[in-house]
Amino acid sequence: AQSVTQLDSHVSVSEGTPVLLRCNYSSSYSPSLFWYVQHPNKGLQLLLKYTSAATLVKGINGFEAEFKKSETSFHLTKPSAHMSDAAEYFCVVSTSLPIQGAQKLVFGQGTRLTINP
Amino acid sequence: NAGVTQTPKFQVLKTGQSMTLQCAQDMNHNSMYWYRQDPGMGLRLIYYSASEGTTDKGEVPNGYNVSRLNKREFSLRLESAAPSQTSVYFCASERLVNTGELFFGEGSRLTVL
């Protein structure tokens, strides 16, 4: 069965410094992987998606993630943090066999990112 | 530009009461989903609907029912609310079939006393 583990429940960085949010996945198949972001009291928004086309995936707001099969990782990075990046981030893996045309996603526990001025 | 709209945003119930969470999307998406979010547990799928007229159970369906009223609307019903159903509920729709690219509503915070 597919699963994801986010290695940090809380990450705190200073504005202007790099961001690294770590995610490991488990999958019997070549997975589709996602990062979603949730700002306070808002719904989730897709940040980026990996589907085997390229191992380095660029997303919105300067975020990117690298798929490393040998390490079963899909870490999220950003070179320079901005105050507006403060949010909860979820690593997500898809099931390999969509049922009835619907995609079933498995969410990690989330990493809360705090940006210090 | 409404996207996915959920109502109500907040609700307090007593144990045993029933209620329905409403969800509507205006993006002409086929697939719709209901998730619940609990601290430290990410999101867990309750029910989904791949297309109008079809629904199926997700990971945690017990205590819930759903109705896909038409292509736009997908409601979640709690027949007899329990304190364990205190949670934040999110409705989502999928842009293209099997992409995993979901659009979420802003959530409905439910407290069961």
Image (tube, coloured by chain):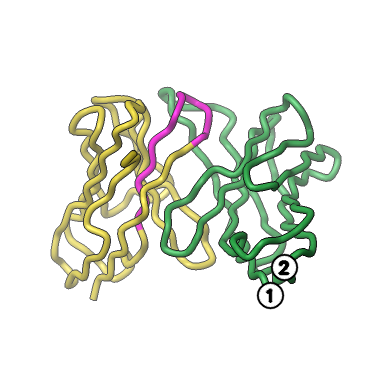
Chain colours: A green, B yellow
Quick check: A112 above or below A96? Answer: below
Q: Point out the image quarter for the N terminus of chain B.
A: top left
Q: CA distance from mark 2 to mark 1?
A: 6 Å
Q: Amino acid at mark 1?
A: Pro
Which quadrant of the view contains residue B3? top left
Marks 2 and 1: same chain?
Answer: yes
Q: Residue at x 27, y 50 (%)?
A: B6
Q: Point out the image quarter for the C terminus of chain B.
A: bottom left
Kindly give the residue lying farthest to the right in the view shown: A70
Chain bearing tag 1 is: A
How crowded is the residue under tag 2: few (<14 C-alpha within 10 Å), some, or many (20+)? some
Q: Pointers 2 and 1 in contact (CB under 8 A)?
A: yes
The earlier-in-sequence mark between 2 and 1 is: 2
Determine which of the numbered discs, if any, sits on residue A15 in the image.
2
Q: Is residue B96 magenta?
A: yes
Q: Amino acid at mark 2?
A: Glu
Residue B5 position, x and y percent, is 29, 46
A30 left or right, relative to B69? right
Of the pair B98 and B46, the residue shown nearer to us:
B98
Q: Residue at x 86, y 40 (%)?
A: A70
B109 left or right, relative to A77? left
Residue at image mark 1: A117
Of the pair A111 and A103, the residue shown nearer to us:
A111
